Every structure is written in structure tokens, then in C-alpha cells.
Image (cartoon, rainbow, N blue to C red):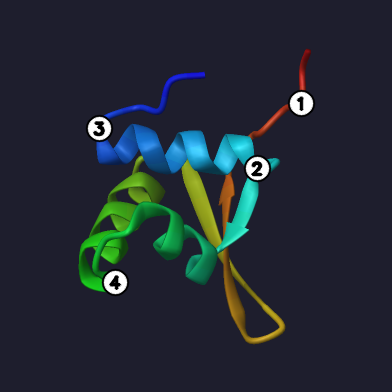
Amino acid sequence: MKRPYDRRDRVLWILAQKGGSITLTELRRSMEIKHENLDRLLSDLENEGRIKRTELKGKQLISLKNYNLQM
């Protein structure tokens, strides 16, 4: 599968590849961008209702909203 070029699409693609959720640290490593830029991108996606952020055991978890595993 070809990786998306757009950063917003890439975040969603990475989340889908990881089963719908990933820690912020793992996502930042996968994206290879600065924390500030990723935070702004995640805020936009969260405001659009595409993702949700939750705190779990001291780590921030990023998840796709309404992620369904359909094959």
C-alpha cells in the first residue's frame, strides 16, 4: 500500500495501520515532525471529529473515531 503524501492523511493512515490507535510518542516517531507541528495537526483532526485523544497510564493515546475493522 502506498503511503499518503499529505500529513493529515498520513496520520489517519498510520492510525489505521496500527489498528486504530497509537501513543503520541509512537506517532511522532512515525511522522518524523516536530511536536508543535504534530500537536497542531492533531488539534485540527480532533476538531473535525476524525480522531480522539485520551490519557492512559500517563501516556497520550491517539485513536481514530468510529474505527471499524471491516475486511
Q: Nearer the viewer, residue 51 or 23?
A: 23
Residue indicated by mark 4: 35
Q: CA distance from mark 1 to mark 2?
A: 9 Å
The residue under label 2 is: 20
* Image coords of residue 1 (percent x, y): 52, 19
- Among numbered discs 1 and 4, the one appearing first in the sequence: 4
State the residue at coordinates (41%, 63%).
28
* Label 2, label 4: how far apart the Cα atoms are: 21 Å
The residue identified by callout 3 is 6
Residue visible at 49% across and 46% down in the picture:
51
Q: Which mark, by number, is residue 69?
A: 1
Q: Which structural element holds mark 1?
A: loop
Give the CA distance from mark 4 to mark 3: 17 Å
Q: Are marks 2 and 4 in contact (CB under 8 Å)?
A: no
Q: Are marks 1 and 2 in contact (CB under 8 Å)?
A: yes
Decide which of tag 4 and tag 3 comes sooner along the chain: 3
- Mark 3 to mark 1 CA distance (whole Å): 23 Å
Tell me where residue 31 appears, x and y as whole percent. 36, 53
Left/right of residue 63 with respect to residue 50 in the rendered view: right
Q: Can you tell which of label 1 and label 4 is closer to the viewer?
A: 4
